[in-house]
Amino acid sequence: MQSFQPPRRILMGPGPSDVSPRVLAALGRPTIGHLDPAFQELMEEIKGALSRLFNAPGYACVPLPAPGTAGMEAAIMNLLEPGDRAVIAVNGAFGGRMVDMADRAGAEVVKVEFEWGKPVDPAAVEEALKAAGKVKVLAFVHAETSTGARSDAASLCALARKYGALSIVDCVTSLGGIVVDAAAWDADVVYSGTQKCLSAPPGLSPICLSPRAQAAIAARTTKVRNWLCDFNLLMSYWGGEGGRTYHHTAPINALYGLHESLVALFEEGQQAVLVRHARTYEALAAGIEAAGLRYLVDEPHRLPQLNAVIVPDGIDEAAVRSYVLAKWDLELGAGLGPLKGKVWRIGLMGASATPWHVRLCLTALCEALAAQGFAADAKAALAACDGKLG
Ligand SMILES: *Cc1c(COP(=O)(O)O)cnc(C)c1O
């Protein structure tokens, strides 16, 4: 064997996003014990920073030791017991994953489906809640990464409250890219991942739980089915000042990386980070349209950090991605499920949301399209993009 040397890539797919040199440097610092007092200080800082970032005062905030999917699984497995009813909105791949998990938890699942590319319609969810009777959980995806559609988390969490259900909000792609506000939404469980807009490597899932959610978990009559993410056990590790006991071994160095990405985020400023995502999206959108391409999602419901662009007739979707990877070291995302072969997914997440990334992506994409005979005007695309960047 030889040491693995990864190629240099520019990551503009649905995640992971580019990891900054300062976060990569943090990952390589010396490993210490997970019960070391210095590490416990780091844990406390991360908890505090996550609470600020989710705006979740009074919530329990921790980074789970596995990628975003672990946050989803923890939320569902902790809140749902066999026989509980859950209403789950599905407008893309990740809503579908939630349904599968809730089913595995033994819950009775009411699925409310929407066309891929559309946001979740709160009126349809309210109909389902009305018809369903007693509902334990309402779950939905805030930022559906498979399509680039943003749903109205405030309205959906309010519906959960109105019908006496706990809300689970998937903010894997939204956190750090658009406003996430657990307190204002009065949300119950909100989770995310490190590899999207936080721009740390994949492998951790920040999660926060409201006092209501914690009480519901404490009141369970059956054990949580998966041990690692059982919140009752987990909090004895992450929770108590001084009283910390062994549960699992925290991924020490991965947490250095998350910590550094949070330091960078607060240094730049939470508001400034959101503005940067919005601005780079506007520049990309102007360029995409000037190049003669169209978006999947209607303008008011678009996520700045995930841009699903429709593949024009006669263009080989995969060949374009292969071209930009080979010639520009640029990774773009493919469509999932019903959108396979029909869209490209362009991520502007975290450290990948810069004017440089937008210009590079437009240049590379136009070149790849031209290679297939599609007359994408790169000059016009860049001019439109620069017009937005000023
Ligand atoms: C990426 C993503 C996940 C899963 O996160 P992983 O880090 O891939 O496990 C869940 N939900 C949404 C909306 C995502 O974009």
Image (tube, rainbow, N blue to C red):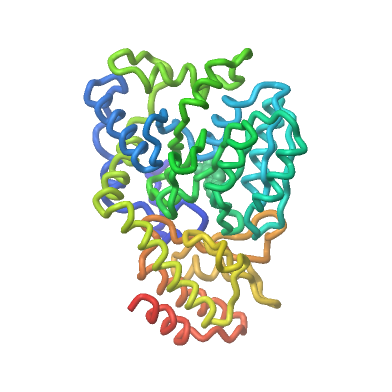
Question: In the rendered view, would you say 102 is above or below 150?
Answer: above
The quadrant of the image that shows the N terminus is top left
The quadrant of the image that shows the C terminus is bottom left
Residue lying farthest front? 162
Residue lying farthest right? 131
Q: Quadrant of residue 31?
A: top left
Residue 79: percent from left, percent from top: 59, 26
Residue 389: percent from left, percent from top: 36, 75
Residue at 34% across, 15% down: 244
Q: Quadrant of residue 272?
A: bottom left
Visible residue check, residue 261: yes
Residue at 42% across, 17% down: 247
- Rendering quadrant holding ligand 1: top right
Question: In the rendered view, would you say 261 is above or below 380?
Answer: above
Q: Exactly how many numbered labels are in the figure?
A: 0
Residue 26: percent from left, percent from top: 27, 42
Left or right: 1 in relation to 312 = left
Left or right: 237 in relation to 92 = left
Residue at 45% across, 43% down: 184
Visible residue check, residue 318: no
Left or right: 52 in relation to 30 = right
Residue at 59% across, 19% down: 224
Residue 265: percent from left, percent from top: 30, 50
Q: Looking at the image, which is closer to me, 193 or 333?
A: 193
